[in-house]
Every structure is written in structure tokens, then in C-alpha cells.
Image (cartoon, rainbow, N blue to C red):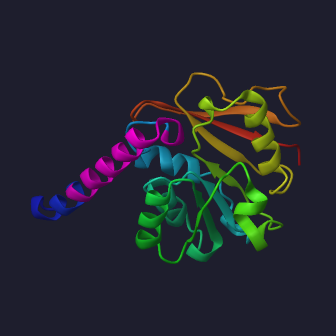
Amino acid sequence: MSQAERKPQKRARFNEEIRFFKGWLADVKAVGAILPTSSITARVMASVIDTSSGLPVLELGPGTGVITKAILDRGVPADQLYSIEYSKDFADHLKIEFPDVNIIHGDAFNLDKTLGDKKDMLFDSVICAVPLIYIPVAQRASLVENLLDRVKPGRPVIQITYAPKSPVPQGSGNFEVVHYDYVLRNVPPANLFVYRRPA
């Protein structure tokens, strides 16, 4: 790729980082990190998806869409991806960037209302970038239980965190917690945890 071809990509990435930073300034607890998730981290998170299942995927906290893109690159059809974003600014941006994805402006902690007539849908897996660290532990565990009720037993909910430990501790609900990966090439470095119930 030539220098001239790289410039638009760098500009797009810079604009994305500025948008994300503004979102972070507006609501630190809702955004959680100062920069978007790296494309490397996004690919690792999307790797848990079983594209042969034929089931849709649920994404929570897509932000500027880095993980959304990785999910689509994984092979998930756009109309089979449901992405829930709490920030209206981010949701509006995502609807332009990913017009065929089901972008929903709503609250991940009130999924029945947010999903509306899709509330009983079964998903293959859940990709979660909601910053749980600012939420009480009981509410975090309740969210994970709710998410696991929406996937088949044995299928994962994957969560990103910048803390060394899982934001939802083992023993806080009817699920197991497994450390999935540590991604150094992220700002800040990211830990990924998977929650699942036995198949």
C-alpha cells in the first residue's frame, strides 16, 4: 500500500479516535476507555463466534464500530448482527457506517425493552464492551445471567476489561468464568474474559 493510500486510513482512524475521546469526556462511565478498542483486540473477541450456527450475534457497547467491523469480517451477515449502543451520538454514527446492521440505541441493562419484539431471540454469542467496572457487582452478575439466558448453553459471552481480574467474579452467578486472552497491543492493554454455562 502506497503512502497516498495510507493517508485516508490514518485520517479515518484519527477522526474515530477524536470521536471516541469526545464521547469519553462526555460520559467516562459509559465509554470506559480513552481510545477505541484496537483492531487486534476486536478480532480476538470476534473469534468466539460460531458462524456455522446460523444464529444472530449480539454486540453490546459497539462505540465507534471497531468490534462491529471485526464481527462482520468474521463472516456474520450484517442483518444477523444486533448492536446495542447507549450513546445516541455513537449510535447515529454507527447507523451511517453500518447501514445494514441492526443498530439499536438503548440500554444493555434493560434488554427486554431495548430489543423490543426481538427480546426472545436466541443468539450464538454475545460480544460485550460495556465498561462494567463502574457498575455494582450484583448488577454486573445479573447482566451476565441475562445474556447467558439469550444464548445456547455452552456458548460464550465475551467481555473486555482493562482491569487484571474479571469484572464479574467466579461464584457470583450460575456460570463459569475463564480468562480468554491478554492483548498488549491495545490502549490500555486489555484482558478478555468468557462467561458460559455448561453445554
Span of residues in magenta: 11-31
Q: Is residue 143 above or below residue 77?
A: above
Q: Is residue 32 above or below residue 154?
A: above
Residue 91 image offset from top left, x and y in percent: 49, 62
Q: Nearer the viewer, residue 192 or 90?
A: 90
Q: Is residue 153 left or right of residue 30?
A: right
Q: Is residue 116 above or below residue 191?
A: below
Considering every residue shown, the one lying at the far left of the view is 4
Residue 49 image offset from top left, x and y in percent: 65, 57
Q: Is residue 162 left or right of residue 156?
A: left
Residue at position x 45%, y 58% from top?
90
Q: Nearer the viewer, residue 197 or 27?
A: 27
Q: Is residue 170 left or right of residue 106?
A: right
Whether the magenta-drawn stretch holds residue 26 is answered as yes
Q: Is residue 15 left or right of residue 51?
A: left
Looking at the rendered image, the quarter that the N terminus falls into is bottom left
Q: Main secondary structure of the magenta part?
A: helix
Residue at position x 55%, y 24% from top?
163
Residue at position x 89%, y 36% from top?
174
Residue 83 image offset from top left, x and y in percent: 59, 62
Residue 121 image offset from top left, x and y in percent: 80, 68
Q: Nearer the viewer, residue 144 or 124?
A: 144
Considering every residue shown, the one lying at the far front of the view is 26
Q: Quadrant of residue 118?
A: bottom right
